[in-house]
Image (tube, rainbow, N blue to C red):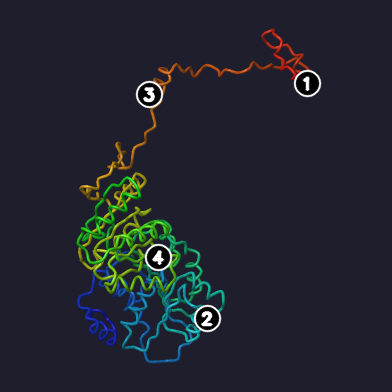
Amino acid sequence: MFDQFALHERLLKAVAELKFVEPTPVQVAAIPPAIEGRDLRVTAQTGSGKTAAFVLPMLNRLIGDAVVRTDVRALILLPTRELAQQTLKEVERFSQFTFIKSAMITGGEDFKVQAAILRKVPDILIGTPGRMIEHLNAGTLILKDVELLILDEADRMLDMGFAEDVQRLVGECAKRQQTLLFSATSGGAALREMAASVLRDPLHLQLNRVSELNEGTRQQIITAESTEHKEKLVHWLLANETYKKAVIFTNTRVQADRLYGRLVAEGVKAFVLHGDKDQKDRKLAIDRVKEGGVKVLVATDVAARGLDIEGLDLVINFDMPRSGDEYVHRIGRTGRAGAEGLAISLICHNDWNLMSSVERYLKQRFERRVIKGLKGSYGGPKNLKASGKAAGTKKKKDDKKKDDKKKGVDKKAKPAGKPTAKRPKNAKRDEPASQIVSQDGLAPLRRKKPAAE
């Protein structure tokens, strides 16, 4: 029960109103030390309830009587506007019985309107690094008195190239008393360096090992021989699998638009979501899928973070993601909160090594699947390395020598060509080559001048 935590009664009232009964493992682990004021580095899978794990301690710190605000007190940085919107909604739900005010600043919205919002000085500011930096440069954002800094999906922010922006924003919050860093993956060396630079004597909570992520999701691969073959497989899966809602991931915007067009032409109700879509279209796409008016969303990795769609139980990787972390974030859209899900990756010859790398990262082997009537000519590499990657087809040196011998090739023989005159050691440097005697005693060949036309 949430009353086990030392939370303010107004927050417990909101929790009860929202019908939150049992806290999730990440909430049990993170809320008490966060309330105590410890810096935290938390690694927990997407959909584990980590938003509440930092929102409730944050609100507990800021709660109090209504006063005139002069500075932003808490800053939450996130990688995408979708995740920012979702987080703002959670903050507003949990703070409904308090005087705490929150606001969101992301790209894709009117800059002047946002500047007006900032002049009202919200207690909590939620946003993406890029737009925050723009307001910082314009002088419309002041962070010198921020008490609490939260970096959510920090690994994704680094993946998206926000490292410098995040470091600058962290530097602006020099007086902060507490920093919480959350990520869905370990993030590698870059995230370790960031954590070391922004956290002070942190408590590291590792809620899930990589191999335990998304245990409720079946993971399959289907081999395909071409893009066209993949499109046929997608159509078959959408027509024959049992699912409430599905998301199909591509690596490029061009492929997302192409696949979306093919599905619509075949009568599938779908929306497409990628970085070229403006905020209005992106919001419409997500809302329609959430409401159930549309069952299928075609998206690039911009949608891999921050999408919390109830009933999403099928993920199709049209293109294999480029890293194990990105794979985890994609399939994290399904199998959430203990529900079952299905993740299917379509594998061409150029996807195999990526897929093999992801298997090694997760320390598991995906289920191989064949769809009758749609089996292609490609079924995987003929030869595999110990790592599971495709073995090269380069010939060994001995085999190549044998081939050369059969063809009568003598590598030691010098290539045929015109004899060239060599200048003896005792020859004068300005002596013309035509007068130099070659080393074999024969005069060098002269090139005949063409006859006058």
* SS assignment at label 4: helix
Q: Rounded to the nearest whole Å, what is the CA distance between mark 1 and mark 3?
A: 55 Å
Mark 1 and mark 3 in contact? Answer it, CB < 8 Å.
no
Judge the density around disc 2: few (<14), some (14-19), many (≥20) Cα neighbours within 10 Å: few
Gap in angstroms between the C-alphas marked 1 and 4: 79 Å
> Residue 398, position in %: x, y?
39, 23
The image quarter in which residue 34 lies: bottom left
Which amino acid is tagged 4?
Ala
Answer few, some or many: residues within 10 Å of disc 1's Cα (few below 14, many 20 plus, some between 14 and 19).
few
The dot on residue 160 is: none
Relative to 239, 191 lies left or right: right
Q: Would you say the residues marked 4 and 3 are in contact, meaning their CB atoms lie under 8 Å apart?
A: no
Q: Amino acid at mark 1?
A: Ala
Q: CA distance from mark 4 to mark 2?
A: 28 Å
Q: Is residue 413 left or right of residue 314?
A: right
Residue nearest the observer in this picture, 234 or 326 = 234
The residue where tag 2 is placed is 112
**Cα distance between the residues tagged 2 and 1:** 81 Å
Q: Is residue 339 left or right of residue 327?
A: left
Give the vertical position of 436 relative to 176 (above or below).
above
* Residue for badge 3: 399
Residues at badges 2 and 1 in contact (C-beta under 8 Å)? no
Q: Between 50 and 266, which is closer to the camera in this rendering?
A: 266
Q: Position of residue 4 (x, y in %)?
A: 22, 79
Would you identify the image quadrant in which residue 437 lies?
top right
Disc number at residue 154?
A: 4
Counting from the top left corner in percent of width and height, residue 174 is at 49, 74
N-terminal-most mark, 3 or 2: 2
For label 1, the residue is 452
In the rendered image, residue 142, in percent from the top left (x then y), is placed at 51, 79
In-front residue for pair 268/278: 268
